[in-house]
Amino acid sequence: MLFFLSSLLIYETAGQEWDPESRVPYMYKDDQWVGYDDIQSFIEKGNYIKNKGYAGAMVWLFLFIPV
C-alpha cells in the first residue's frame, strides 16, 4: 500500500515507459517502479485473448479509497 501511495506522489516527476515484452506501461523514479494498465494495454490484452481463442479473462481490481 505504501508503494502505491508513493507512486501517486511521484507521478508528475516519474519517467514513463512502455514494456514491449509485457505490453504494459510502467512508471519509475530512481530505483522504484510500478507497472499499470492503460487503454492501450487493455486493447493488447483483449487482442491476445481473441487471437488465442480463449473464452474470457479475469480482472483483478485494486480500488483505493482513502477514508
Image (spheres, helix red, strand yellow):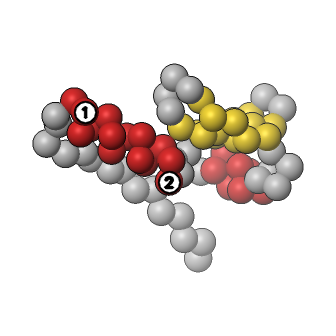
The local secondary structure at tag 2 comes to helix
Which quadrant holds residue 3? top right
Residue under label 1 = 51
Q: What residue type is labelled 1?
A: Asn
Marks 1 and 2, how far apart at CA: 18 Å
| CA neighbours of label 2 inside 10 A, class few (<14), some (14 to 19), many (20+) | few
Q: Which mark is residue 8?
A: none
Q: What residue type is labelled 2?
A: Ile
The local secondary structure at tag 1 comes to helix
User: Could you tell me residue 8's position as x and y percent?
Assistant: 71, 56
Q: In the displayed structure, does residue 66 sit left or right of residue 48?
A: right
Tell which of 1 and 45 is nearer to you.
Answer: 45
Q: State the residue at coordinates (79%, 40%).
A: 15
- From what the image shows, is residue 46 above or below residue 66? above
Q: Which mark is residue 39?
A: 2
Q: In the displayed structure, does residue 63 sit left or right of residue 20?
A: left
User: Could you tell me residue 62's position as x and y percent?
Assistant: 45, 56
Q: State the residue at coordinates (19%, 45%).
A: 56
- Give the farthest residue toward the bottom: 67
Q: Earlier in the sequence, mark 1 or mark 2?
A: 2
